[in-house]
Image (tube, rainbow, N blue to C red):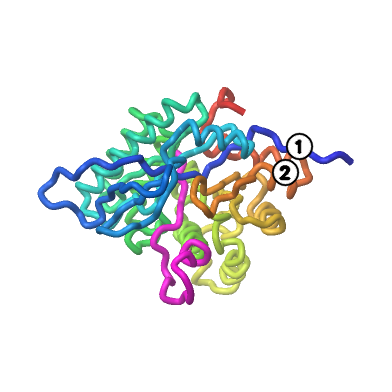
């Protein structure tokens, strides 16, 4: 049997952007976390926050030509870009946060305009102020034609399943926009022993799993059944938590009273990226959540990204129909792309 050649049709739902520069803050007092950029080694800049280097990033964060060239090598036809999660800035006062996110969204719109149809966007909104968030959501839809939004796994420590965000998600559903949930300032950092990079390696998937669980236990998708919501890093720990949650639902009457549909069924309404770095784990996600719910994700262009997403999925998945779902069809449905998008 001959080897299967990776296609160039992949759609990546998990890729990030940092603008090449940030505007000076024009208000009375600059927020401590207002970002700026400082020159670093060739083709790199330091993202500065509160007077310190938050992260050093390459020009692939903003250079569309280099990004599109890399996409070709990775087998990707389309990439959904979203802000580096720390830029979501939920901890800022609402007005400067809204100004910053509006600027970042406009920068992403510029990138899309110069991508030849290869990029779509998941914008950012200031969820610390629901009214401002809804206003920017409408701008993203009606003025910038974005496919959806990126949100954090928690909003200043509040779970995304909290009823406080129900009015916002009602608007997202009404506007038919996708929601991509990325880990942000995760809980449990005090339990980790080792370098700071363990936040990305271990704490991120833990927080994502709890965020997804909060959507299930709050019945969010039952109230908003047309909401399309995806979770980064394969849904984090949810695949392992789900059997225990399902068993608890069946054992404890109080859980049956509060959770209005089987956790397993609710989990299969959500979407997940395939960014798990391991073939058996990817196949486990497909078995647990359904072949129609898994999409490619890379975390491009950061150091911890998957450089061969299409080849990895092609190698792991033997069934052609399932492979096509994961490579592009599920993402097309999640992002609301029409059949004219590049493949």
Residue drawn at 41 percent across, 48 percent down: 41
Image vertical order of residue 130 relative to residue 255, above or below: above
Image vertical order of residue 202 relative to residue 287, above or below: below
Farthest-out residue, right: 1
Instruction: Check disc 2 and report its element: helix, strand or loop.
Output: helix
Q: Give the class, few, some or many, for how many residues have Cα within 10 Å of label 1's Cα (few <14, many ≥20).
A: few
Q: Quadrant of residue 16?
A: top left
Image vertical order of residue 280 relative to residue 327, above or below: below
Foreground residue among 326 and 190: 190
Please state the horizontal and vertical placement of residue 299, each as a whole percent of the image: 52, 49
Please state the horizontal and vertical placement of residue 222, each as a whole percent of the image: 49, 51
Residue beneath disc 1:
5
Q: Quadrant of the C terminus?
A: top right
Asked whether residue 136 is in view, the answer is yes
Q: Quadrant of the N terminus?
A: top right
Q: Which numbered disc flags the more N-terminal residue, 1 or 2?
A: 1
Please report contact status of discs 1 and 2: CB closer than 8 Å, yes or no: yes
- Residue 190 magenta-highlighted: yes
Residue beneath disc 2:
314
Image vertical order of residue 149 relative to residue 48, above or below: above
Foreground residue among 301 and 126: 301
Which dot, 1 or 2, sits closer to the camera? 1
Position of residue 200 in the picture relative to residue 277 (left or right): left
Instruction: Check disc 1 and report its element: helix, strand or loop.
Output: loop
Foreground residue among 174 and 211: 211
Number of numbered discs visible in the structure rendering: 2
Residue drawn at 60 percent across, 46 percent down: 307
Residue drawn at 52 percent across, 37 percent down: 79
Q: CA distance from mark 1 to mark 2?
A: 8 Å
Please state the horizontal and vertical placement of residue 48, each as a whole percent of the image: 30, 53
Give the residues drawn in magenta, as a range: 177-203
């Amino acid at each position: 049997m001959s080897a299967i050649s990776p296609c160039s049709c992949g759609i990546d739902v998990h890729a990030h952007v940092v603008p090449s520069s940030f505007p000076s803050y024009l208000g009375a007092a600059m927020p401590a976390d207002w970002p700026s950029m400082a020159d670093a080694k060739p083709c790199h800049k330091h993202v500065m926050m509160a007077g310190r280097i938050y992260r050093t990033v390459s020009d692939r964060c903003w250079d569309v030509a280099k990004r599109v060239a890399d996409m070709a090598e990775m087998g990707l036809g389309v990439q959904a870009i979203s802000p580096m999660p720390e830029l979501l800035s939920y901890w800022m006062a609402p007005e400067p946060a809204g100004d910053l996110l509006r600027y970042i969204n406009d920068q992403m719109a510029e990138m899309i305009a110069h991508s030849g149809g290869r990029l779509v966007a998941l914008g950012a909104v200031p969820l610390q102020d629901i009214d401002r968030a809804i206003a920017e959501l409408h701008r993203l839809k009606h003025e910038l034609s974005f496919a959806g939004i990126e949100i954090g796994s928690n909003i200043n420590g509040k779970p995304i399943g909290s009823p406080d965000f129900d009015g916002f998600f009602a608007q997202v559903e009404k506007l038919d926009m996708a929601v991509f949930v990325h880990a942000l300032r995760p809980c449990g950092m005090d339990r980790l022993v080792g370098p700071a990079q363990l936040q990305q390696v271990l704490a991120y998937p833990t927080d994502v799993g709890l965020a997804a669980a909060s959507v299930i236990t709050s019945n969010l998708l039952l109230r908003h059944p047309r909401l399309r919501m995806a979770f980064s890093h394969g849904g984090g720990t949810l695949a392992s938590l789900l059997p225990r949650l399902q068993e608890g639902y069946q054992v404890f009457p109080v859980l049956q009273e509060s959770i209005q549909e089987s956790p397993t069924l609710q989990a299969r309404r959500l979407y997940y990226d395939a960014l798990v770095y391991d073939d058996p784990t990817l196949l486990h996600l497909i078995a647990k959540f359904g072949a129609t719910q898994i999409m490619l994700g890379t975390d491009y262009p950061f150091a911890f990204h998957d450089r061969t997403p299409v080849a990895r999925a092609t190698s792991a998945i033997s069934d052609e129909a399932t492979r096509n779902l994961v490579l592009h069809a599920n993402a097309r449905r999640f992002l609301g792309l029409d059949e004219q998008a590049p493949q």
